[in-house]
Amino acid sequence: MTKDNAYLMCKEASMATILEIKHLADEEMQTEVIPLRSGDPSVPAEEQDGGASSLAIFLPDAQAATGAAVLVCPGGGYGFIANNHEGVQVAQWFNERGVAAFVLRYRHAPYHRHPAPLEDAQRAMRIIRARAAEWRVDPGRIGVMGFSAGGHLAATLGTHYDAGDRTAADPVERISCRPDFLILCYPVITTYPPYAHIGSRDNLLGENPDPTLIELLANERQVTADTPPAFLFHTDNDAGVPPENSVMFYLALKKAGVPAEMHIYADGPHGMGLGLYDPVIGTWPERLADWLRVRKII
């Protein structure tokens, strides 16, 4: 599948978002990009859209650094990576506020399915925590942020983390991958109809998934009292991923006694990223900044 075909086939994206992605996909800031795993063989050309996994590092000015950090998971229906408006632009926004940002390129369909994306997110979180001192990051203030299907990945990391394998030969694998907070933007949460985004589910699990996996990755059913606190943002008329996804996760957090804040705006298309072009929707990032301050993350 070519990149252009992936854009056109991704049912979750609005046409405006598709055009923006196609125009901006290759316009990235100059930054260090590291592979998630050393010694990986080079990815065959036919797999380049879904075979590589890496971490792009965006650090704020040393004088402005707060010590907080965020792993950013762009969306793309588990079929491509919306790396600019849900990745690089978000990293810039965080850097301007003294927060280190790490944009994840995770494996995805058509060549990779679960658990590959989750393994990549877990590995990325361990790397950030392992190299926290080098990047001027507080290992106790590292969150994960995700958009759309990337929101599902972020929520999956927040409900399927582990403390690390103390017997692992690789020291990175000995470190916890639990995020300290979650930021979920118009996220895919459930894998069950009527609110599941079936395109994302099919890309992640295949067209006839094992019912056990459907249950396991319905993240509203995996929340516990140990799930990290969360900020959620959605729009009421989201035609790609219904806002019930955020509502279900919020209610699960509330039932488990986990601190959470949710903002649902009346109007706005799916896949808007920061939404800074809109005078109303564009206010949601400042609500996030307020939440980060209230939580003493920044």
Image (cartoon, rainbow, N blue to C red):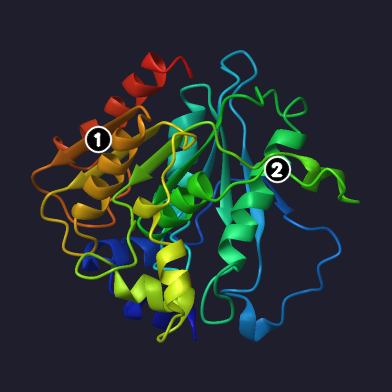
Neighbor class of circle 2 (other Cα within 10 Å; few <14, some 14-19, many 20+) is many
Q: Is residue 192 left or right of residue 59?
A: left
**Residue 79 visible within the image:** no
Residue at (28, 61) in percent of width and height: 17
Q: Is disc 2 in contact with disc 1, using a CB cutoff of under 8 Å?
A: no
Residue at image coords 22%, 43%: 277
16 vs 224, left or right, is left
Q: Position of residue 158 (x, y in %)?
A: 50, 44
Residue 279 image offset from top left, x and y in percent: 15, 35
Q: Residue 291: percent from the left, percent from the top?
A: 34, 22
Q: Quadrant of residue 294?
A: top left
Q: Secondary structure at mark 1?
A: strand
Crowd band around label 1 with a 10 angstrom C-alpha radius: few (<14), some (14–19), many (20+): some
CA–CA distance between discs 2 and 1? 27 Å
Residue 295 image-quadrant placement: top left
* Residue kind at label 2, given as amino acid type: Arg
User: In the rendered image of this protein, does residue 197 appear above or below residue 238?
Assistant: below
Q: How many discs appear?
A: 2
Q: Which mark is residue 126?
A: 2
Q: Which residue is tagged 1?
A: 262
